Image (tube, rainbow, N blue to C red):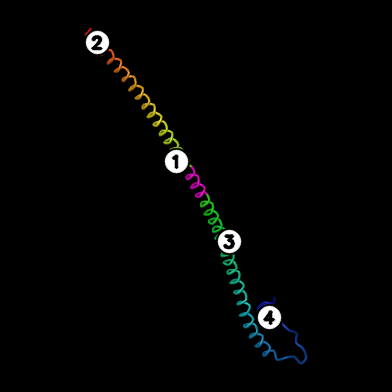
Amino acid sequence: MITPLDIQNKEFTKGLRGYKEIEVDEFLDRIIESYERVYNENIESKEKIRLLQEQLDKYNSLEKTLRDTLILAQSTAEEVAINANQKAELIIREAEEKGKKIIEEANNEVINVRKEYENSKKDFQIFKTRFKTLLESQLDLVNDSSINEQL
Protein backbone atom coordinates (compact mmCIF):
# COMPACT_ATOMS: atom_id res chain seq x y z
CA MET A 1 0.00 0.00 0.00
CA ILE A 2 1.29 3.45 -0.82
CA THR A 3 1.83 5.66 2.21
CA PRO A 4 1.58 9.47 2.25
CA LEU A 5 5.36 9.55 2.68
CA ASP A 6 5.77 7.55 -0.57
CA ILE A 7 3.73 10.18 -2.39
CA GLN A 8 5.67 13.01 -0.83
CA ASN A 9 9.06 11.52 -1.70
CA LYS A 10 8.10 10.57 -5.25
CA GLU A 11 10.12 12.50 -7.82
CA PHE A 12 9.32 12.58 -11.44
CA THR A 13 11.81 12.95 -14.23
CA LYS A 14 11.53 16.08 -16.28
CA GLY A 15 10.55 15.80 -19.82
CA LEU A 16 10.75 18.17 -22.70
CA ARG A 17 7.37 19.63 -22.53
CA GLY A 18 6.46 18.58 -19.05
CA TYR A 19 3.88 19.92 -16.66
CA LYS A 20 4.45 23.01 -14.60
CA GLU A 21 6.34 21.88 -11.56
CA ILE A 22 4.58 24.27 -9.16
CA GLU A 23 1.11 23.08 -10.18
CA VAL A 24 2.14 19.46 -9.92
CA ASP A 25 3.71 20.08 -6.48
CA GLU A 26 0.59 21.92 -5.23
CA PHE A 27 -1.64 19.17 -6.53
CA LEU A 28 0.57 16.51 -4.99
CA ASP A 29 0.48 18.40 -1.66
CA ARG A 30 -3.33 18.36 -1.73
CA ILE A 31 -3.29 14.66 -2.63
CA ILE A 32 -0.83 14.00 0.20
CA GLU A 33 -3.06 15.81 2.71
CA SER A 34 -6.17 14.05 1.50
CA TYR A 35 -4.47 10.67 1.28
CA GLU A 36 -2.85 11.13 4.69
CA ARG A 37 -6.25 11.91 6.22
CA VAL A 38 -7.79 8.82 4.55
CA TYR A 39 -4.76 6.72 5.50
CA ASN A 40 -4.97 7.78 9.17
CA GLU A 41 -8.73 7.25 9.21
CA ASN A 42 -8.15 3.80 7.79
CA ILE A 43 -5.62 3.00 10.55
CA GLU A 44 -8.03 4.34 13.20
CA SER A 45 -10.90 2.36 11.67
CA LYS A 46 -8.82 -0.82 11.69
CA GLU A 47 -7.94 -0.21 15.35
CA LYS A 48 -11.60 0.41 16.19
CA ILE A 49 -12.55 -2.75 14.32
CA ARG A 50 -9.91 -4.69 16.23
CA LEU A 51 -11.16 -3.30 19.58
CA LEU A 52 -14.77 -3.96 18.64
CA GLN A 53 -13.86 -7.47 17.55
CA GLU A 54 -12.17 -8.05 20.91
CA GLN A 55 -15.28 -6.79 22.70
CA LEU A 56 -17.46 -8.94 20.47
CA ASP A 57 -15.30 -11.96 21.29
CA LYS A 58 -15.62 -11.17 25.01
CA TYR A 59 -19.40 -10.82 24.70
CA ASN A 60 -19.61 -14.04 22.69
CA SER A 61 -17.53 -15.78 25.34
CA LEU A 62 -19.74 -14.31 28.07
CA GLU A 63 -22.86 -15.37 26.17
CA LYS A 64 -21.51 -18.91 25.83
CA THR A 65 -20.64 -18.98 29.54
CA LEU A 66 -24.11 -17.70 30.45
CA ARG A 67 -25.75 -20.22 28.12
CA ASP A 68 -23.68 -23.05 29.62
CA THR A 69 -24.48 -21.82 33.12
CA LEU A 70 -28.18 -21.63 32.30
CA ILE A 71 -28.13 -25.15 30.85
CA LEU A 72 -26.29 -26.39 33.93
CA ALA A 73 -28.75 -24.61 36.22
CA GLN A 74 -31.69 -26.10 34.33
CA SER A 75 -30.26 -29.61 34.48
CA THR A 76 -29.43 -29.14 38.17
CA ALA A 77 -32.97 -27.90 38.85
CA GLU A 78 -34.40 -30.89 37.00
CA GLU A 79 -32.10 -33.21 38.93
CA VAL A 80 -33.10 -31.61 42.24
CA ALA A 81 -36.79 -31.93 41.32
CA ILE A 82 -36.34 -35.58 40.36
CA ASN A 83 -34.44 -36.29 43.58
CA ALA A 84 -37.07 -34.47 45.63
CA ASN A 85 -39.86 -36.45 43.96
CA GLN A 86 -38.01 -39.71 44.55
CA LYS A 87 -37.39 -38.78 48.18
CA ALA A 88 -41.03 -37.79 48.61
CA GLU A 89 -42.16 -41.09 47.10
CA LEU A 90 -39.79 -42.96 49.40
CA ILE A 91 -41.08 -41.08 52.45
CA ILE A 92 -44.68 -41.79 51.41
CA ARG A 93 -43.91 -45.47 50.85
CA GLU A 94 -42.17 -45.73 54.22
CA ALA A 95 -45.07 -43.93 55.92
CA GLU A 96 -47.59 -46.24 54.25
CA GLU A 97 -45.59 -49.30 55.31
CA LYS A 98 -45.28 -47.95 58.84
CA GLY A 99 -49.02 -47.22 58.90
CA LYS A 100 -49.81 -50.74 57.68
CA LYS A 101 -47.52 -52.18 60.34
CA ILE A 102 -49.19 -50.09 63.06
CA ILE A 103 -52.65 -51.17 61.85
CA GLU A 104 -51.53 -54.80 61.72
CA GLU A 105 -50.12 -54.58 65.25
CA ALA A 106 -53.34 -52.94 66.45
CA ASN A 107 -55.42 -55.68 64.78
CA ASN A 108 -53.22 -58.34 66.38
CA GLU A 109 -53.64 -56.66 69.74
CA VAL A 110 -57.42 -56.54 69.26
CA ILE A 111 -57.37 -60.25 68.42
CA ASN A 112 -55.26 -60.95 71.52
CA VAL A 113 -57.57 -58.87 73.73
CA ARG A 114 -60.61 -60.73 72.31
CA LYS A 115 -58.90 -64.07 72.97
CA GLU A 116 -58.07 -62.93 76.48
CA TYR A 117 -61.67 -61.81 76.97
CA GLU A 118 -62.99 -65.13 75.68
CA ASN A 119 -60.55 -67.03 77.92
CA SER A 120 -61.58 -64.88 80.90
CA LYS A 121 -65.23 -65.50 80.06
CA LYS A 122 -64.63 -69.28 79.87
CA ASP A 123 -62.64 -69.18 83.11
CA PHE A 124 -65.47 -67.25 84.74
CA GLN A 125 -68.03 -69.81 83.48
CA ILE A 126 -65.85 -72.63 84.76
CA PHE A 127 -65.45 -70.86 88.10
CA LYS A 128 -69.18 -70.16 88.26
CA THR A 129 -70.01 -73.80 87.48
CA ARG A 130 -67.50 -75.11 90.06
CA PHE A 131 -68.68 -72.65 92.67
CA LYS A 132 -72.29 -73.58 91.99
CA THR A 133 -71.37 -77.25 92.23
CA LEU A 134 -69.54 -76.59 95.46
CA LEU A 135 -72.46 -74.68 96.88
CA GLU A 136 -74.88 -77.36 95.82
CA SER A 137 -72.70 -80.04 97.37
CA GLN A 138 -72.41 -78.00 100.54
CA LEU A 139 -76.14 -77.47 100.53
CA ASP A 140 -76.68 -81.16 100.04
CA LEU A 141 -74.32 -81.81 102.88
CA VAL A 142 -76.15 -79.38 105.09
CA ASN A 143 -79.46 -80.92 104.15
CA ASP A 144 -78.13 -84.38 104.83
CA SER A 145 -76.82 -83.25 108.19
CA SER A 146 -80.08 -81.84 109.24
CA ILE A 147 -81.80 -85.07 108.35
CA ASN A 148 -79.22 -87.03 110.30
CA GLU A 149 -79.68 -84.82 113.30
CA GLN A 150 -83.37 -85.27 113.32
CA LEU A 151 -83.05 -88.88 113.32
N-terminal label among 2 and 3 = 3
Three-letter amino acid code at the position of disc 1? Gly
Label 4 packing within 10 angstroms: few (<14), some (14-19), many (20+): some
- Magenta segment's dominant SS is helix
Q: Which residue is mark 2?
A: 147
Q: CA distance from mark 4 to mark 1?
A: 99 Å
N-terminal label among 4 and 1 = 4
Question: Viewer-nearest of labels 2 and 1?
Answer: 2
Q: Position of residue 104 (x, y in %)?
A: 45, 37
Q: CA distance from mark 3 to mark 4?
A: 48 Å
Asked if the residues shown at circle 4 and circle 1 are in contact, with their CB atoms under 8 angstroms apart, the answer is no
Q: In the image, which residues are magenta?
A: 83-93
N-terminal label among 4 and 2 = 4
As rendered, which of 33 and 72 lies closer to the eye? 72
N-terminal label among 3 and 4 = 4
Three-letter amino acid code at the position of disc 3? Lys
Asked if the residues shown at circle 1 and circle 3 are in contact, with their CB atoms under 8 angstroms apart, the answer is no
- How many labels, in total? 4
Asked if the residues shown at circle 3 and circle 4 are in contact, with their CB atoms under 8 angstroms apart, the answer is no
Label placed on residue 64: 3
Q: Which residue is mark 4?
A: 7
Q: CA distance from mark 4 to mark 2?
A: 169 Å
As rendered, which of 14 and 117 lies closer to the eye? 117
Is 9 drawn above or below residue 110 in the view shown? below
Is residue 85 magenta-colored? yes
Asked if the residues shown at circle 4 and circle 2 are in contact, with their CB atoms under 8 angstroms apart, the answer is no
